[in-house]
Image (cartoon, grey):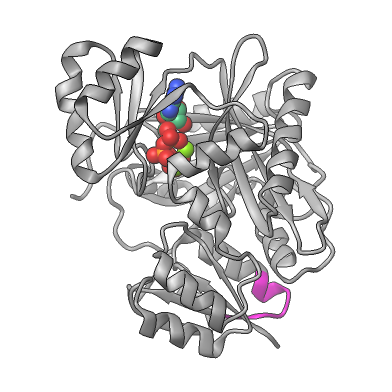
Amino acid sequence: GQTIGIIGGGQLGRMMAIAAKAMGFRIAVLDPTEDSPCGQVADYKIIGEYHSLQSIQKLAEVSDVITYEFENIHAEALNWLCSHAYVPQGTSLLEITQDRIREKAAIQNAGLEVAPYGVIKTQQEIYDNIEKFGLPAVLKTSRGGYDGKGQYVIKSEQEINEAAQLLEKGVCVLEQWIPFEKEISVVICRNSNGETAVFPVGENIHKENILHQSIVPARITKNAKDKAIQAAQQLACELELVGTLAVEIFLTKDDQIYINELAPRPHNSGHYSIEACETSQFEQHIRSICNWPLGQTTLLKPAVMVNILGEHQQGILEKIPSLTDWKIHLYGKKDAKYKRKMGHVTLLRDSVEEALAETEKSEIWSDVTEKIGG
Ligand code: ATP
Ligand code: MG
Ligand code: MG
């Protein structure tokens, strides 16, 4: 069979690998750690840095098709790959989504709205932009941030000094705070033939900037749903997507949508699709990069997905044997650090309310105050 090479050995790579193996592929993974979540299920492991040309070369040697599970791969490594290996997704979407400034420009070019923003290189520019669109505002590093790392929510002018420390990490963007009613997301896949498939819109609840749960179908109007799906289609088309694109959206009370950010890969908010949809986002990703016809994305049942962070793992482990109708996924990470994504659970029920009541009642996610690990 053919071998799919994955850059990055985290949980997204692991779930891609599991889907691909079920479809008959072999998996090679490049990751710096010996025992990565994806490495545990892969056929070949290449242990090395993502940007090391030597490692990338090794991955290319054993792979027929190369994909990635995270977006911060160095441009140099990417360029080498594109001329020496088969990377159906290309590199342009990666280059766009690695950088909030480029990403916002691309979203606007696709005819969609983002929160009013300014590019920030100096502390003075923070003042200038705040004068334009007021407070609160959020300062974000243009590159490298995730799970709210590399961000500062500025609520008063007194905080500008502290926020400006982010500039040490490079160019930033300052965004107006959008008083959203809901956060929603859409995952869309597209193959090289231009066939697209959109997953049902999910409603996302974050806790301390980390996704806590996704609720599908999202409890929003049909109008909002149509807008979100239309936005995803527009982006997939304009960006000439091959593979998977996740679109994070702010939805306001009057059903306006603002695109928050994009991820050029399967997304945490799409994990529910493993059990809740006819085809999962991971299978669909593999189909997309292989230019196979795409599967149906029909929602089989209302679903709630909840993340298991380091501080929740013990609670889950104690209950696993009795949780017969919870779909539990653990990613094989040894170190249950506070806030680290260790796994997730999905509940399929007759209504999302029923699923929500059940996860609430379990008390696994009631505020865990004791911090685990370092
Ligand atoms: P991810 O892990 O999703 O990549 P990230 O670190 O890139 O996260 P963002 O998605 O930019 O961060 O922001 C994290 C969260 O902060 C958002 O999901 C949203 O709840 C809040 N947030 C960010 N920007 C804004 C904004 N302009 N207005 C309102 N809320 C915002
Ligand atoms: Mg992000
Ligand atoms: Mg985000």
| Left or right of residue 328, residue 308 in this image | left
Name above or below for residue 301 compared with residue 194.
above
Q: Residue at x 78, y 19 (%)?
A: 223
**Residue shown at 49% from the left, 56% from the top:** 95
Task: Indicate the position of residue 24 as horizontal and vertical percent values.
Answer: 72, 80
The residue lying at 33 percent from left, 74 percent from top is 49
Write down which quadrant ligand 2 falls in: top left
How many labels sit on residues?
0
User: Can you give x and y, in whole percent of width and height, for residue 226 in the image?
Assistant: 78, 27
Q: How far across and how far down the image is residue 61, in percent? A: 52, 90
Query: In front here: 240 or 313?
Result: 240
**Looking at the rendering, which quadrant does residue 62 occupy?**
bottom right
Residue 139 x/y as whole percent: 32, 29
Q: Nearer the viewer, residue 127 or 338?
A: 127
Q: Is residue 344 magenta?
A: no
Q: Which residue lies at the image location 66% right of the left edge and 23% below the top edge?
A: 353
Question: Is residue 322 at all visible to an observer of this figure?
Answer: yes
Q: Is residue 235 left or right of residue 31?
A: right
261 to the left or right of 160: right
Residue 363 showing in the rendered view: no
The quadrant in which the N terminus is found is bottom right
Q: 54 left or right of 27?
A: left
157 above or below 44?
Answer: above
Residue closer to the observer: 307 or 129: 129
Q: Is residue 23 located in the magenta-colored stretch of the structure?
A: yes
Figure check: 344 above or below 3: above
Frontmost residue, 294 versus 315: 294
Question: Which residues make up the magenta segment?
Answer: 20-27
